[in-house]
Amino acid sequence: MKIITTFNDRIYSFSGRRLLKQLDEVVPLAEKVIYEDFHHSITNKRGIETENGRTINLSGLKTYREVLTANQDVILKSCGGSADSVAGDAFWNSRWFGWFCKVAAMHHAVCIDDKNLGHYLVFVDADIRFIKPLNDSILDELTKGRPITFVKGNRPAIDSGFFVVDMSSPKPEKFYGYFMDLFLSGNFKTHTRW
């Protein structure tokens, strides 16, 4: 099992550090991969506190840089773009690039990073909390053989804070390739929220 998460300095200080400590307790043998967007370089030697973990800087990913460069006009300055304000759905369009970081991380984890990682890849948001240990048997029961499984709370919208990818299936790689292409091609701007 490999655990994927993303955070910047603020989220790491707010909840990420606590998540990593909890992951060390509930899945101590799982590899933890932290896709980070820190404004100040933090490495395992200087601040990431977890066992069996590594960091990948989001700005080092080719897809991240390409989407950032091609969409400066619709990425707020606070997120690294040149836009002072956004058009369309203000809630989504002001925050989309932060959420895109999850897409970039998962695309990299599923399509590019080391494939020899075991059966499951699990994405967890930095504000997720576990109440009991997590193992492959629990994930088998949760996924029921589906290649991608997400957990939805009682809100009307999907919350992508916890999902599981079955890396034994070829379908997740196809899905994340398609999903990333929406951003690389700029086709994401054809959706009604824009």
Image (tube, helix red, strand yellow):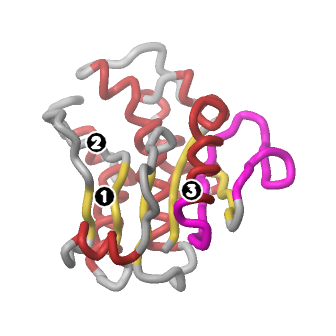
Residue 188, compared with residue 116, is above or below; it is above
State yes or no: residue 33 in magenta. Answer: yes
State yes or no: residue 153 in magenta. Answer: no
Residue 120, compared with residue 69, is above or below; it is below
Q: Residue furthest right?
A: 45
User: Are there few (<14), some (14-19), or many (20+) residues within 10 Å of tag 2?
Assistant: some
Name the element at disc 1.
helix
Circle 2 sits on which residue? 159
**Residue 179: numbered disc:** 1
Q: Quadrant of residue 170?
A: bottom left
**Chain part drawn in magenta:** 26-50
- At horizontal 61% and vertical 41% (from top left) the residue drawn is 18
**Residue 192: numbered disc:** none
- Which dot, 2 or 1, sits closer to the camera? 2
- The reply to whether the C-beta atoms of the residues labelled 2 and 3 are less than 8 Å apart is no
User: Are there few (<14), some (14-19), or many (20+) residues within 10 Å of tag 1?
Assistant: some
Circle 2: residue type: Asp
Query: Residue 15: percent from the left, percent from the top?
Result: 57, 35
Q: Nearer the viewer, residue 100 or 154?
A: 154
Name the element at disc 3.
helix
Residue 150, compared with residue 140, is above or below; it is above
Circle 3: residue type: Leu
Q: Principal SS element in the magenta part?
A: loop
Q: Is residue 156 left or right of residue 46?
A: left
Mark nearer the N terminus (2 vs 3): 3
Work out how far the residue at label 1 is from the one at label 3, CA to CA, in angstroms: 28 Å
- Which dot, 1 or 3, sits closer to the camera? 3
Q: Residue furthest top?
A: 84
Circle 3 sits on which residue? 23
